[in-house]
Image (cartoon, rainbow, N blue to C red):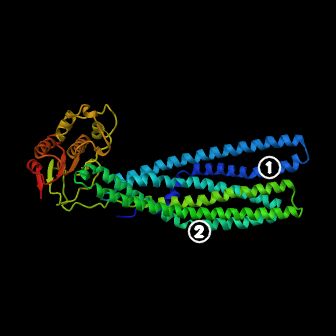
Amino acid sequence: MKAAEPGGSFILRRTVKRQWKRAVLGALFLGLWQLSEALVPIAIGLIIDHAVLPRDLRLLVISLVSFGALFFVLSGSYRIGSRVLNRAVNHESHALRVEVASHALTKMSTKDLVPGEVMSRSTADADSITRIFGQLGTGVSALAGFAGAAIFLLFSDWLVGLIVLIIAPIISGIVAVSSRGISQRSSTQQATLATAGAQVGDTMLGLRVIKAIGGERWASSAYRQASQESAKAAINTAAATGKVAGIGELAVAINLAAVLLMAAWRVSSGQLEPGQLIAIIGIGVYLSEPIRLLSNSINAAAVAHGAANRVAEFLSVEEDKETNPENLDVSGSTFIVANPDCLTLPEQHEGALIVPHAADVFEGTIRSNIAMNHDPAAVVDDSVLAASGATDIVAALPDGLDAQVRDSGSNLSGGQRQRIALARALHADPDVLVLVDPTSAVDSVTEVNIAQGIRKYRAGKTTMVLSTSPAFRHIADRVIE
């Protein structure tokens, strides 16, 4: 193994960099939203002092129109900012899913792939990472709203404003320190969730075998244990998140109490007008929102960092490229049979196709599994079906090549799956084809027919078979022990 990518912090920075235009635009509009929210109590206070108490009807009408315009800006900026950031989330989630899947398909060995692992990293982790856009938006909006409120308080009553400016950074610091453990807990939660998912996948794939040997109790016990571990990890994450949220709410209450007490004292001493008092109380109540947004943003950013660490760890795993100890030159041979233990697989390159022993069959039709596309008009040559021994499979099904195949080929036998996978490899028709035990799941008569069919179909091209099968050894141009 070798490290191919830096850690989670790099993944998060790269995520933001790839969508930076949307991130900036969305954050600006959400900042305008929170600034408008902060202006609402201020506007109410100004209307009371300058229009309501003086009973100025003309100024009151102007104030109400302006107040309506403020709400229009407030609502519109939130809608636009949220939509822009949602686009960033969806585009980046897709990019991360494709990257994880592509890495698994092209750079990882099958021994490094745990069932459910790719699915977990490309769905739950990718979604958690892209929450960083929402947190950037809410973080910027919280700071904008807080700054607007603090400036008003400083101009209205410098003492109240100073208290807010002192208390709020302390609150944010406490929340940030308290959230440090959330990232690790979130990473552990996703790991145990992937393990439980892998357990389910293994159980469902081998369900017929498990039931045949009476292993239901064992399978149930194994899944129960994996599920309980996942539940414990989720509870730990939720507990840590809840504690941080509780600290944030307590801090909000303290901040609000300080503002209200100070404002009440200033009113009793005659230093504030009624409208100013209403505005300050409104601002004090409003300040709970940006502080809450900021604390939630810190929590979610910690979760995103944990998910990014998992994706970075996954992307750092690459298949070790081993050289062929036999230094085998296959360019001049047409049909080679080798003992599977005597050499490693040749390095895959353009024009070569390596087909492993495990037969991967996908949901769709027999035609789509062979042609590797979902075009109902895709042509599959009869000679491919004959050479792979798949002719009788197609003939036995009412819909022939268009017969439905369930997920992982669960409605097919092992031999049928293997022959369909072989037909897929022959249909691809590469210059060099490497087959690893291509007939391990078929009977001896079918094996002989397939060996002869492959030799005939692949005439003039290089085919290497890693197998101890007598049928293949008998017809090979060259046998390597």
Label 1: how many Cα within 10 Å (few below 14, some 14–19, many 20+) = some
The CA span between labels 2 and 1 is 36 Å
Q: Which amino acid lies under the numbered mark 1 shown in the image of this protein?
A: Ala
Q: Using the image, determine if residue 326 lies above or below residue 95.
A: below
Q: Are marks 2 and 1 in contact (CB under 8 Å)?
A: no
Name which residue lies at 67% across and 52% down: 31
Name which residue lies at 60% across and 61% down: 245
- Residue bearing mark 1: 43
Name which residue lies at 58% across and 67% down: 178
**Mark 2 or mark 1, earlier in chain:** 1
Give the quarter of the figure containing the C terminus. Answer: bottom left
| Circle count | 2
Quadrant housing residue 409: top left
Q: Using the image, determine if residue 370 lies above or below residue 258.
A: above
Most foreground residue, 53 or 212: 212
- Residue bearing mark 2: 177
Q: Left or right? Give the position of 432 relative to 363.
A: left
User: In the rendering, at what x and y percent does residue 351 appear?
Assistant: 27, 47
User: In the rendering, at what x and y percent does residue 443 appear?
Assistant: 13, 46
